Amino acid sequence: MKQKIVMKVYMNCQKCRTKAFKVVASTYGVNFVGLEGEEKDKLVVIGEGVDAVKLIKWLRKKVGQTNILRLTEVKDG
């Protein structure tokens, strides 16, 4: 099942954004990583078989405070 995870990650500098992107991109099953929102603090992750809980824990450890905003299924077509 392909899913879309939208998270609010408190990234106050470019270095934090880069670190967050590297953490997410290295996670198993991730196909797409992007930013959303005017403040560029919402991270969008699309992938298949991504464990959202482990991803959140890892981001909290490496970058800082992270919260899940939305977790939805993506339908191909």
Image (cartoon, rainbow, N blue to C red):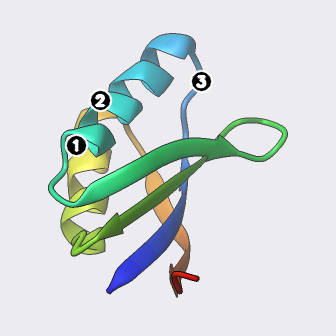
How far apart marks 1 and 2 lie (CA) works out to 13 Å
Q: Is 69 placed left or right of 52 in the picture?
A: right
The residue to which callout 1 is attached is 61
Q: Quadrant of residue 64?
A: top left
Q: Secondary structure at mark 2?
A: helix
Give how far across and how far down residue 5 sits, in percent. 48, 68
Circle 3 residues within 10 Å: few <14, some 14–19, many ≥20: few
Give how far across and how far down residue 49 sits, in percent. 21, 75
**Between discs 3 and 1, the one toward the N terminus:** 3
Q: Amino acid at mark 2?
A: Lys
Q: Residue furthest front?
A: 77
**Between discs 1 and 2, the one toward the N terminus:** 2
Q: Quadrant of residue 12?
A: top right
Q: Nearer the viewer, mark 1 or mark 2?
A: 2
Give the number of the disc on residue 17: none
Circle 1 residues within 10 Å: few <14, some 14–19, many ≥20: few
- 19 in relation to 29, above or below: above
Along the line of sight, which residue is nearer the eye, 30 or 23?
A: 30
How far apart marks 3 and 1 lie (CA) works out to 16 Å
Give how far across and how far down residue 38 sits, in percent. 84, 39
Q: Quadrant of the C terminus?
A: bottom right
Q: Nearer the viewer, mark 3 or mark 2?
A: 2
Q: Quadrant of residue 51?
A: bottom left
Q: Secondary structure at mark 1?
A: helix
**Between discs 3 and 2, the one toward the N terminus:** 3
The residue to which callout 2 is attached is 22
Q: Secondary structure at mark 3?
A: loop
Q: Amino acid at mark 3?
A: Asn
Give how far across and how far down residue 21 sits, in percent. 39, 33
